[in-house]
Amino acid sequence: MKPSTVLLTSRVRPIMKRPKCATASRVGKGRPQQQVSSAILRKVARTMLPFYQAIASRPAYAAKWSAAVVDADLDSMKKLLSEVSAELGRLAYGTNGIGYFITFGFRGSDYGYTNGTTIPPGTVQFKFQTNVHRRLARAVIPYYRALAYRPAYREAVVRSIRDGHSDHLERIVRSKVKSSALKSVQVESSGTALTFKYRSSKYAYRNLLFLEGVL
């Protein structure tokens, strides 16, 4: 069965496509890590930043991405990720029909660190608005750039996540994300959850970084 024919009607977890070579998308060495680290956030942010820049600056690319997300067209998603960078095209990725998830693995671990954007499950099905995604991408680019290239900023985010201090994390995130559409910032699943609500959409969109088990 092709990925695009799999029914998503009642799914919360996304349809995922894993790389053929598991080590191609691994980060770090040694014992399994079950907490976020500065090195993990740096790797994720540096890899994902060009993707958000492409979504924000290339309307046709962003429209193709939204269509692939809604249609669960994993082949098109891979092609589009690979257009941004070969590394992105080698990662595990998936869709739940209302968002997407890109997962970075760790050598010797059953855990992965995931970045994605989704409408909250149970809100709507088979919907992902290009205009909203582009505005969200523009809003989070300074945040991901700081995570990628400013060690002190990144360490402050890691401390907030590990300590579970959502209030502290919110102050840090809002120093980079200036959009009034950002409604909440929370620590969730050893990561961050940024919830946006634009007036042009009935739906909230969540930009997520989180630790998860890799099946």
Image (cartoon, grey):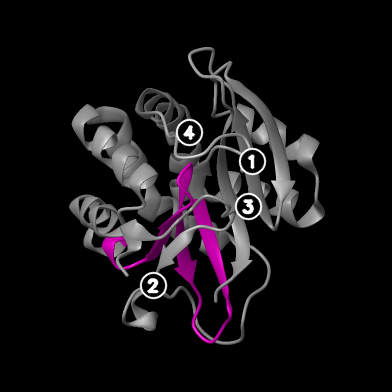
In which quadrant will I find the C terminus? bottom right
The answer to which of marks 3 and 4 sits earlier in the sequence is 4
Q: Residue 134: give x, y in percent of width and height.
A: 37, 28
Nearer to us: label 3 or label 2:
2
**Which amino acid type is shown beneath numbered disc 2?**
Arg
Nearer the observer: mark 4 or 2; the answer is 2
Tell me the crowding category of disc 4: few under 14, some 14 to 19, or many 20 or more residues within 10 angstroms, Cα based: many
Residue positioned 81% across, 53% down in the render:
163
Determine the residue positioned at 62% across, 32% down.
Answer: 195
Task: Determine contact: label 3, label 2, CB under 8 Å.
Answer: no
Q: Which residue matches tag 2? A: 18
Q: Is 90 a magenta residue?
A: yes
In the rendered image, which residue does mark 3 sit on?
155
Q: CA distance from mark 3 to mark 2?
A: 30 Å
Residue 122's mark? 1
Q: Above or below — where is 215 with respect to 66?
A: below
N-terminal label among 4 and 2: 2
**Amino acid type of the residue that numbered disc 4 sits on in the rendered structure:** Val
Please provide percent x and percent y for residue 88: 31, 59
Name the residue carrying label 4: 140
